[in-house]
């Protein structure tokens, strides 16, 4: 005599709870991976934009000015400042016509908090 036994309710609930815990863990892992990917893309984009603005300033004749650039797709705005700088050598001589070019990246989502700065000296 063979009896058909079905699954007990307790076994089904236990199997479903294990499955749900596994799915939630995978979703959290996926979310963390997507966040890390977004941050990496933002940092790469910011570095490339800053380097591009600095290279552009090096190609132009330096003059004292402040330029602001609108936010990009990652909500990062940029500012390029060129100002004369007094540079003194170790032997006491001064270099004339030296400009400091500073490119600053600011996060517009966080009240224009400075997230990166890149600078160099140029001479006409």
Image: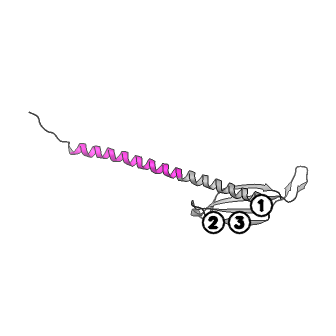
Gap in angstroms between the C-alphas marked 1 and 3: 13 Å
The first of marks 1 and 3 along the sequence is 1
Identify the element where label 2 is drawn: loop
The residue depicted at 12 percent of the width and 37 percent of the height is: 3
Q: Residue furthest left?
A: 1
Side (left or right) of 32 relative to 72:
left
Side (left or right) of 8 relative to 120:
left
The residue where tag 2 is placed is 70
The residue where tag 3 is placed is 67
Q: Are marks 3 and 2 in contact (CB under 8 Å)?
A: no
Looking at the rendered image, the disc whose residue lies closer to the viewer, 2 or 1, is 1
Write down the quadrant of residue 68 in the picture.
Answer: bottom right
Residue 23 drawn in magenta:
yes
Side (left or right) of 59 relative to 8:
right
From the image, which quarter does the C terminus lie in?
bottom right
Identify the element where label 1 is drawn: loop
Residue 10 drawn in magenta:
yes
The first of marks 2 and 1 along the sequence is 1
At label 3, counting other C-alpha atoms closer than 10 Å, the crowd grade (few under 14, some 14-19, many 20 or more) is few
Magenta part of the chain? 9-37
């Amino acid at each position: 005599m063979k009896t058909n036994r079905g699954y007990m309710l307790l076994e089904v609930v236990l199997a479903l709870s294990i499955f749900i815990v596994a799915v939630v863990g995978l979703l959290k892992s996926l979310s963390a991976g997507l966040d890390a990917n977004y941050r990496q893309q933002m940092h790469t984009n910011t570095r490339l934009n800053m380097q591009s603005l600095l290279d552009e300033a090096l190609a132009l004749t330096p003059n004292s000015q402040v330029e602001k650039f609108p936010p990009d797709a990652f909500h990062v705005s940029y500012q390029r400042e060129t100002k004369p700088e007094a540079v003194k050598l170790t032997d006491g001589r001064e270099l004339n016509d030296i400009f400091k070019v500073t490119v600053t990246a600011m996060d517009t989502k966080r009240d224009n908090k400075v997230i990166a700065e890149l600078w160099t000296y140029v001479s006409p």
